């Protein structure tokens, strides 16, 4: 394995030997005679590995390793020294050395040690990259390490630099507005405003004014010109939440805005061009709304460019505990309570509950527990009865079933044989066929019963 190698060696003869070996192995080499020069070269060049002599003219190799670590230089460190001792080796390894080689050393020893260190460094970087990709527990306001949330994070990262419209779906309380915030913060538009508007919370006759603004006198009460959310978000992001609640006549105007990027304030005649990144969200099945004629199909295709579906909390596994711990710490600080965590039974109850209200419901439950109780641990008894499935069961209107008829096996056997004989007119072979036994079995049972009286 070839790499960029920084050799820190103040003895010219030793340096030439090492450089010859490294060149023979195909590595790219730079050489520094002092610790200060080595530190500057490492920061500027960012080598894959550094061969460090412990004794240097200005400061020790151990001190150099400490300074490299302080500067976040991630190269593999291999110590070369003629002053080998157990203490020096231990201290070097404690400071992050990958290996320790005593002078004089063979070219084979240097080759194997260097290849092992480079391979280990590569594997560690690959592992770190995989953990960052697959195991992030936090991301732009989100908390969750589940595979479903990792997929959401990757989609946000991919879509953030784009101008494409993002359409977020998911149950109420799953964090759709957090998606808009994350997209905005991760985008080149982060320096401008994110403007959020809930289309379901605004009266339909005011929705146009809220999005596109109005001029003075446009309607009763319009005492002055007012910019809408689209103008306020110019250069940034416009988040239209619950867009499935938007009335049909407003959908037509929004479609024109999406197509042209131009808005005309209500009551005005002068169009204005704005540059916004549009993010929409709804808890409804938007395709079903299109098929039912409640949402325009042409608008759907304009908006549904990059879809992100937020998973419900009940499908996110251990995320519910991660979120619960975060909320407990947050509310504990706000309420000045000394909660430290949950006991085992409380965590088990939180895991088992299906959370129909998702994160919003979890917030409510934990706020209630913190306000009404004292720490240090949240116990099962502090959680609402609904969460614990403690609500009294509805009485069953159906009559209780009769208990099963249980009798000794010998009694059942005699009853079945006699019933079969009665059914066949005392024809033993036919009764045996019905009971799937040998006729001799019935003859033997009859004889035994007769002897027993």
Image: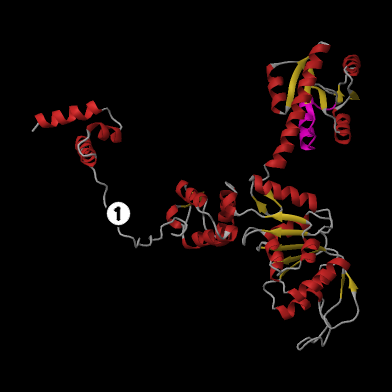
Residue 104 in view in this figure: no
Left or right? Give the position of 325 relative to 400. right
The local crowd at label 1, few if under 14, some if 14 to 19, many if 20 or more residues have their Cα within 10 Å, is few
Give the SS element for disc 1. Answer: loop
- Tell me where the magenta segment starts and ends, as one range: 57-76
Of residue 228 and residue 438, the one placed in the foreground of this image is: 438
Is residue 67 one of those drawn in magenta?
yes
Percent coordinates x, y for residue 351 in the rendering: 52, 49
Percent coordinates x, y for residue 360 in the rendering: 59, 61
Left or right? Give the position of 330 relative to 453. right
Of residue 90 and residue 315, the one placed in the foreground of this image is: 315
Percent coordinates x, y for residue 290 in the rendering: 72, 65
Q: Is residue 388 above or below residue 246?
A: above
Q: How many marks?
A: 1
Its colouring scheme is secondary structure
Residue at image point 22% right, 41% down: 419
Residue at image point 74% right, 15% down: 84
Tell me the residue that label 1 is attached to.
401
Residue extending farthest to the left is: 453
- What is the quadrant of the C terminus in the image? top left
């Amino acid at each position: 394995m070839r790499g960029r190698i920084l050799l820190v060696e103040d003895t010219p003869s030793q340096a030439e030997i090492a450089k010859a070996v490294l060149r023979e192995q195909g590595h790219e080499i730079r050489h520094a005679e002092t610790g200060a020069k080595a530190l500057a070269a490492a920061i500027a060049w960012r080598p894959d590995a550094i061969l460090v002599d412990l004794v240097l003219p200005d400061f020790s190799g151990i001190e150099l390793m400490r300074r490299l670590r302080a500067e976040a230089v991630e190269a593999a460190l291999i110590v070369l020294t003629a002053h080998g001792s157990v203490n020096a080796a231990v201290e070097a390894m404690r400071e992050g050395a990958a290996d320790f080689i005593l002078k004089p050393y063979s070219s084979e020893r240097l080759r194997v040690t260097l290849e092992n260190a480079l391979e280990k460094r590569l594997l560690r970087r690959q592992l770190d990259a995989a953990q960052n990709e697959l195991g992030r527990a936090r991301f732009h306001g989100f908390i969750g390490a589940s595979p479903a949330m990792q997929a959401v994070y990757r989609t946000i990262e991919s879509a953030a630099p784009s101008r494409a419209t993002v359409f977020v779906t998911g149950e109420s309380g799953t964090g759709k507005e957090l998606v808009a915030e994350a997209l905005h913060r991760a985008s080149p538009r982060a320096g401008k405003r994110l403007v959020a508007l809930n289309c379901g919370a605004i009266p339909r006759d005011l929705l146009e004014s809220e999005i596109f603004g109005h001029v003075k006198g446009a309607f009763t009460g319009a005492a002055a010109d007012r910019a809408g959310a689209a103008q306020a978000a110019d250069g940034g992001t416009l988040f239209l939440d619950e867009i499935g609640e938007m009335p049909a006549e407003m959908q037509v105007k929004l479609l024109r805005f999406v197509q042209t990027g131009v808005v005309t304030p209500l009551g005005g005649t002068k169009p204005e061009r704005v540059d916004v990144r549009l993010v929409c969200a709804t808890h409804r099945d938007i395709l079903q709304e299109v098929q039912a004629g409640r949402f325009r199909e042409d608008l759907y295709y304009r908006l549904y460019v990059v879809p992100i579906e937020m998973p419900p909390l009940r499908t996110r596994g251990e995320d519910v505990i991660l979120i619960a711990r975060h909320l407990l710490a947050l509310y504990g600080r706000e309420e000045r309570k000394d909660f430290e965590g949950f006991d085992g039974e409380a965590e088990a109850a939180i895991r088992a509950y299906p959370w129909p209200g998702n994160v919003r419901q979890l917030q409510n439950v934990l706020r209630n527990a913190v306000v009404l109780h004292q720490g240090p641990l949240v116990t099962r008894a502090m959680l609402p009865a609904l969460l614990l499935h403690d609500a009294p069961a509805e009485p069953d209107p159906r009559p209780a079933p009769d208990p099963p008829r249980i009798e000794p096996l010998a009694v059942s056997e005699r009853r079945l044989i006699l019933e079969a004989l009665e059914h066949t007119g005392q024809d033993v072979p036919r009764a045996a066929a019905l009971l799937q036994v040998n006729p001799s079995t019935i003859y033997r049972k009859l004889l035994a019963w007769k002897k027993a009286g």
